[in-house]
Amino acid sequence: MLEDMATAYILKKGNIFQIRAYKNAATAVEHSTVEVKDLWEAGRLDQIPNVGEGLQQYLDELFKTGKVKHWEEVKNGIPEQVFEFTEISGVGPKTAFKLAQLGVEDIEDLKDKLRSGELIKKGFSQKVAEKLLPAIEQMSFVKSGRMLLPYAFNQAQKVIDYVKKSAFVEKIEALGSLRRMVATIGDLDFAVTSNNIQQTIEHIINLPDSQVVKEGETQVTLSTSSGLNLDFIITKPESFGSLLQHYTGSKAHNIHLRKVAEKKGLSLSEHGIREAKNQKPKVFKTATEKEFYHLLGMDVPPPEIREDTGEIEAALAHKLPDLVKQEDIKGDLHIHDNFPIETGRDLGLNSIEEIAEQAKILGYLYVGVADHTPSISNHTNKEMVALVKTRTRLVEQYNSSHISVRVLNLLEVDILPDGRLSVPEEALKLLDFAIVSVHSGHWMDKENMTKRIIKALESPYVKVLGHPTGRLLNQRESYEVDWNEVFKFAAKNNKALEINSSPDRLDLPDILVRQAKEKGVKFVINTDSHEINSMEIMRFGVAVARRG
């Protein structure tokens, strides 16, 4: 909605301050790990950076009435499909408006007219048209029905906090894909242990903003006003371990685990471990997962790696890997600050000083400010170098007067379609190093995209490939790349691949992390934060690394 308002002001030639205000607010909302409506309900809209009193009043009106009179007035006269078209990678407001003027009604109609060549016959740019169809095909405009991990994590934490208020509840844990920290989550499932199951159920069914879908002796299903399905399984403390293990999954992990149990003459269920062959089989109840796995002669595999990818064999051999932990993280090398570097992309919201102070609070030793590069279409090479020099002096001035957190002078540099970098070498020389990322041309074929990335990594000033696959969860698929070639080059030339913690990226994906690790590739876990509050999403990048 906020991005739509920026689009509307651009098309109606609103002043630059109005456009910038909505763009900055949209960026802040996009990078927030808390839903705006939740903040509104709590009376905390003022905690969203760049959302001033005026915008807060509009949001209040939106949530109270379902619309904003002023926004409707500004958008009046702009075809509704314009706002849909701007969701396509590479389509700005003017191009979107042009498509509407040419009679394109929606995304499906756009695909048809592109395939038939009708738009080109009407004067639409052939060069742009060639890029549009692949961009559309990569996007998922149909809701997947799955939540992004950080959102699901935060929603689950609210539920957990409520359930813990009951004096009858001893423990509660999230289950399933959320406990395994998968990138997208369906329903939210919980295991609860209590010595008074009925009282606990009565407490659960009174969860605010929810209604009971199903209620049994030990299970409850709720549906929230925001559309979430919540499943609760309540058990006695002595059976909590087997329940937790069973419903954490994954399915493949549990199938393999049952085969291990069968060889030992045992059978497994959520109720415990049972002797399989005796006429009066003994049931071993387990209060903890440690007890459960130890009965099978195993160490406890961390939930993140329970995907039947070798963790069971490692647990049996007592050779589980020592996975990275949150406390191992000593810095964040991809944060955008608010230095006016005149980029064509979104600026950060905070100063270098504010970023460093937040890094100190998080216990970091270093932090990297990595702005997008100056707009290549609006600056000469000389102007770009001058901007980078100015930003470099600011970093040096900070470091000369502060010792607790070192600020590294970085840039997130665009990889152009031919593999060149979007800033001159003279600017790159000023940096501690550069992060390179693909931000356009996602439609390229595998061979050319692979060459493009490797050419960019050949620069001696480049140390990191940012959000490597370019995916946007629930929105855009990864581009096609020969990852085997990229991994081999990265390992040989000491280039790191980023694990980007942004909620809609979590990129490099865990499967590719595993493959890259086998090739000897190094990784750097970053947040790509555009405001300091989102620096705390590091835990989700750590989860990806652990799963890999």
Image (cartoon, rainbow, N blue to C red):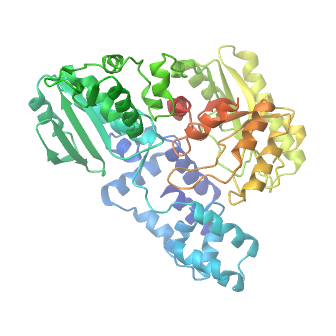
Q: Is residue 226 above or below residue 86?
A: above
Estimate the x, y position of residue 325 in percent, counting from the top left.
52, 21
**Which residue is depicted at the point 64% across and 42% down?**
467
The quadrant of the rendering that contains the C terminus is: top right
Asked if one can make out residue 44 in the rendered structure from this viewpoint, the answer is: no
Q: Is residue 14 above or below residue 407?
A: below
Answer with left or right where residue 393 lies relative to residue 364.
right
Q: Nearer the viewer, residue 341 or 247?
A: 247
**Which residue is depicted at the point 61% across and 68% down?**
11
**Which residue is depicted at the point 65% across and 37% down?**
336
Estimate the x, y position of residue 95 in percent, counting from the top left.
65, 70
Answer with left or right where residue 404 lies relative to residue 311.
right
Numbered circles on residues, count: 0
Estimate the x, y position of residue 94 in percent, counting from the top left.
65, 69
Q: Nearer the viewer, residue 361 or 106?
A: 106
Answer with left or right where residue 471 lies relative to residue 462.
left
